[in-house]
Structures are given as structure tokens and as C-alpha cells.
Image: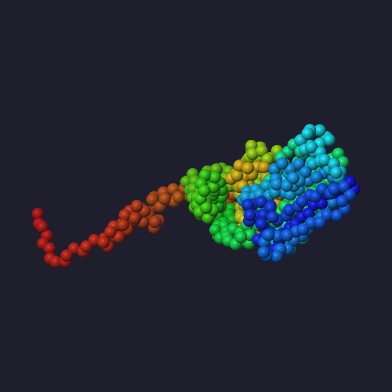
Amino acid sequence: MGFLQLLVVAVLASEHRVAGAAEVFGNSSEGTASGLVFILRPEQSTCTWYLGTSGIQPVQNMAILLSYSERDPVPGGCNLEFDLDIDPNIYLEYNFFETTIKFAPANLGYARGVDPPPCDAGTDQDSRWRLQYDVYQYFLPENDLTEEMLLKHLQRMVSVPQVKASALKVVTLTANDKTSVSFSSLPGQGVIYNVIVWDPFLNTSAAYIPAHTYACSFEAGEGSCASLGRVSSKVFFTLFALLGFFICFFGHRFWKTELFFIGFIIMGFFFYILITRLTPIKYDVNLILTAVTGSVGGMFLVAVWWRFGILSICMLCVGLVLGFLISSVTFFTPLGNLKIFHDDGVFWVTFSCIAILIPVVFMGCLRILNILTCGVIGSYSVVLAIDSYWSTSLSYITLNVLKRALNKDFHRAFTNVPFQTNDFIILAVWGMLAVSGITLQIRRERGRPFFPPHPYKLWKQERERRVTNILDPSYHIPPLRERLYGRLTQIKGLFQKEQPAGERTPLLL
């Protein structure tokens, strides 16, 4: 074996705070999973490593040695950006919207005692430009932040065969691409990333050092990994779910209540995007303003129906909300990670077309469209409420769309999410609620009018009937204006002084 390089992975995880040091200190992966490449000299057969920590507390660590031959590519062998001459580490940064990994380009393998191939001498097939990089993503079990679980699964993301067998390949980069990949951040969800560099000419591979993140801080406090759900979010989505649960089973019967629900969603969604992009106000204040504005939007849609009674406008709003969710589900699938949809123009045009298509398809059967919207949207509000207490990947159906509307760089992120046991349970609950609500409303509304009559016309007819029908007891009731004036006069009299009592002589003319 003419060439041998040793990769050492050291993971420090004495407690959650240390295991999450990637997130606590500078939002980078430094200090959690690191590795070194050592080039053996000719005739060298042993290599000694010493591992230490600068802290005073004992730490749990794991060291893994990997050997490669002269035919294998050298991870990080053409490093020009980071500190080490040969840097096989993956550097990770995250924010609320996206998690970005960066790594140094690799070089071709070479024998002991031989100078490494130049990194930028040419771009032909005899240079490092023929190398390809497969980026892999691995999800830890949901709602488990223990260090034991992290160490156990990190071992599955070290060697090439283990990575290929355990992780999901997200994208393949060529030497012409930037050695940087972005993913949607999943706060509270452990994710491990690794890169495998492949030499297609020799059909050999080598793995970088894995990096991991939970996309949240392990420091104590609200919003930390241990308590991600804000109180304001729990209150908001619980109340929203209670209304949605009612709409799921009784929305078509209580038409004006459903219109309030739909108007709340539309106005609240667009207002939240607008105020978040234009102002730096805190999340809790933003959520309160969104609730108030959404309520105004709901009442406005109810008022439009009551005054004008235009069914087509109301059903267009109803259909667009259902279309929005169906379009979000479409891009929640692997279809959303296609390269063509990383272009914002293509994405939003396609997304809008799918959303508009739903009310168009159901134009001839508006009652069915309305009942479907009640069942599907109402039951999904329950899913969002569950997510505020118990994390589920189903919330990212709409959250990914919201992130894309809020952040101009989110278009480059891959939006993969884990789908594990609790997600299947919540998906079953969502499906059961939706089917039950739709079935119940279809059976109950059989033989009834499709939609209630125009409220304003009914009010006018009733008023005219009371005016012309002298036998109607309401005929003898004074108009509302006179009743209000009389009541104000009575209240005003309470604050007037009483006239002095005594004999009065009338004036006779």
C-alpha cells in the first residue's frame, strides 16, 4: 500500500450543551466533530495520536480511524479557505430558515513520498476536476436530544459504505459547483451531514468528517432545544385548532363561521409575511397583530357575504385556501427539490397555477368544494396545534412555503424532512379527521339547499313585512333609531337636577 491517510473523528458530547456546541458557539460545526488527515512517510507503519480537551470537565469522546490507499481521493486536499492544509471537515452554519454546510475541495490520491497533484493546473480528466461530491443527509430519531443517541448514529456516518447504506443522498456536485449546500433548518431535529468524494475514473471514494446540528441552542431559556414551543404559539394554534375542528365537522352548516375562518387564514397569512419582512418586531407581538388582523379579515369576508351575497367571490376564497394546501403538499414531496424549482419565478408560477386550478376544477360542484375545504383545512389546523406541543414534520407542509416567502435565500435550500413513527400517527389522525368530517357533512346536507340565501335580501324582506303587516307585533315596535334616542334621553335624565316642588300658578291668556 503505497499511500495511506488516517482520518480521526473526535466527537465531544459530555452533555447536551457540549453536543450542541455547533449551535452554541458561532453557529459552526467547530468543536463537535473534527478530523485530520495524516500522510504517512515511506516505510512508516505506525502513527500515534493524542486527544485532549481544554475544559476542566470530563468529556465522552469517540475516535475512529480510516485508512485509504493511493488510488482514493483526498478529502479537503485542495483547501484554500479553511485553516488546515488538508481539511476533511465539514463546516456548518444555520439560522431559522436554512442550514448551510461548506467543505474544501478534494484532490486526487497519490503515493507516499510523491508531491500531491496540483489543484488548479488544469481542468482535464487527469486533474481533480473530474471528482464528484455526493452530499448525504441523515435524520436522528425525532424528539430525542440525548448524547447517547447522537454518538450511536454518528458512527453510521463515518465510512463510505455506512454512509451509503444509512443516509439519504440529496445532491451530487461536480468540481465546477460551489462546495456549499443549503438545507431547510429543522429546529429540535438532529441531522447529520456528510460528503463522499468519488473518482469516476478509478471508481474510488472517500468520506469527509460528518457534521451535525439541531438548529437550536442548548442554552437554557425560551426557544431552546428543550423547550422549542413558545407559549404564544401554543395559545394561538390551540384556539385556531378549536375553530378548525368545529369547521371540519360543521363548517358547511354554519356558513358564516366558515367564512370567518377562511378570511382569517387569508388575511393573517399575508399580513404575517408583510409585517415580518418590513418590520423588526418580536415574534410574540407579530403573532398578536396577525391574530387581530386575521379576525378583521374574517369579519370582512362575512360582511361581504351578508351585504352582497356573491357566492362566487366567497367560494373563490374557499377554493384558493384548499388549493394553497394542495400546492404546498405537492412541493412537500421530492418534486419540490427538483433543480428547476430552485428558481423563484418557476416555483411561484407553478405554485399559483396549482392553487388556482382547484376552484376551477370544482366550479360546477361548489358544495362539494366547500365541504372538502372544511374537512381538509379544518383537520390540518389540528395538525398545526399538535406541532406546537409535539414536533411533527407535517407542519413543514406550509412552513416551507412561508419560509420561502419570508427569506430571499431559501430558494436554494433542500426541504427534506424526516418521516418517522410519530409523523405516521399524526398523518393517520389528520386523514381520519378529514374523512370523518367530509363524510358527516355530505350525509347531513343531503336534500338541503346547497347554500343559505342572501342574508341582506332576507333582512330587507323581513323589514318590509313588519312595516306592512299591522297584525305583526313587531309592527308596533318603534324603529331602532327612535328606541336608541329614547334610551339616551332616559340616561340623560338621570343626571339632571330635579325641579323644586311647590305650587305653581298657570298663566292664563
Describe residue 177's horizontal placement relative to residue 451 as left or right: right
Q: Residue 305: horizontal and vertical position, in percent?
A: 51, 47
**356 relative to 30, above or below:** above
Relative depth, front residue between 50 and 421: 50
**Residue 286 visible in the picture:** yes
The colour scheme applied to this rendered structure is rainbow
Q: Residue 484's x, y, as percent? A: 34, 55
Percent from the top left, x then y, of residue 128? 80, 38
Residue 335 visible? The answer is: no
- Residue that extends furthest to the bottom in the rendered view of this protein: 502
Q: Nearer the viewer, residue 500 or 509?
A: 500
Residue occupying the point 18% across, 63% down = 499
The image shows residue 59, relative to residue 351, as above or below, that is below
Image point (82%, 51%), residue name:
6
Horizontal side, residue 359 vs residue 134: left or right: left
Say which of 372 and 244 sits in front.
244
- The residue drawn where x is 83% and y is 46% is 205
Q: Quadrant of residue 233?
A: bottom right
User: Where is residue 177 drawn, in percent x and y?
Assistant: 73, 38
Residue most extreme to the left: 509
> So how many labels did they put on this image?
0
Along the line of sight, the residue nearer the viewer: 85 or 373: 85
- The quadrant in which the C terminus is found is bottom left
**Residue pictured at 66% horizontal, 51% vertical:** 28
